Image (tube, rainbow, N blue to C red):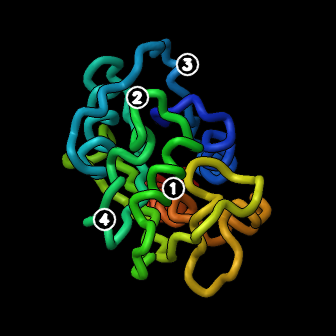
Amino acid sequence: MTICFASNNAHKLEEVRNKVAPLGINISSLADIGCAEELPETQDNIPGNSLQKAMYVLSKYNIPCFADDTGLEVQALNGDPGVYSARYAGPQRNSTDNINLLLKNLQGVSNRAARFRTVITLVGLTKRPVVFEGIVDGEIGSSLKGTSGFGYDPVFIPNGHHRTFAEMTMNEKNQLSHRAIAVSQLIAFLTENFKPAA
């Protein structure tokens, strides 16, 4: 069985491929199925974007698919940047610009509570879409710290830790990241429902 992961991110693909290999499931990338166009992301919330991307691939390429969408939700900013996290400071999708705008908008704000949220939607294997969600609560630091990771990692400090995601190794971050939580739910679902024949 082949399922498309609506991504060309080599790290994300490798992570999932390794975990479903024992099930006899092949994970293809967008490039593998010949999808070179940018997937639509016009919904106003994270679950909506995740579903939209997965349904686009299923309807156009007729292959079961799962897609993920992730956002940073800051309590004092009414959940912003949320679904607009990647383009918070503009269409250039620049992480430094995004972080600078976030820190500017939080100047003088004592409530720094925030959460990273990943939603994965799987379509084409069941009658209805199946949704998996990973959330990591934390807070926004006052300055950038660390050099690993990407996006908002240099200012996000997960609860129970004193370091930002960007100060952690990739392995440390993966132990508690929002995406890792959602991926583990997806793997558990596939394992339970699509076990290889004995």
Label 2 Cα neighbours within 10 Å, binned few <14 / some 14-19 / many ≥20: few
Upstream in the sequence, badge 1 or badge 2?
2
Mark 4 and mark 1 in contact? Answer it, CB < 8 Å.
no
Q: Secondary structure at mark 1?
A: loop
Whether residue 76 is situated above or below residue 79 in the rendered picture: below
Mark 4 and mark 2 in contact? Answer it, CB < 8 Å.
no
Residue shown at 71% from the left, 63% from the top: 145
Residue shown at 56% from the left, 55% from the top: 152
Q: Which residue is mark 1?
A: 195
Q: Which residue is mark 2?
A: 91
Residue 128, given in percent of the width and then of the height, sits at 20, 49
Residue shown at 51% from the left, 76% from the top: 138
Q: Which residue is mark 3?
A: 31
* Marks 3/1: CA–CA distance: 27 Å
Q: Secondary structure at mark 4?
A: helix
Q: Secondary structure at mark 2?
A: loop
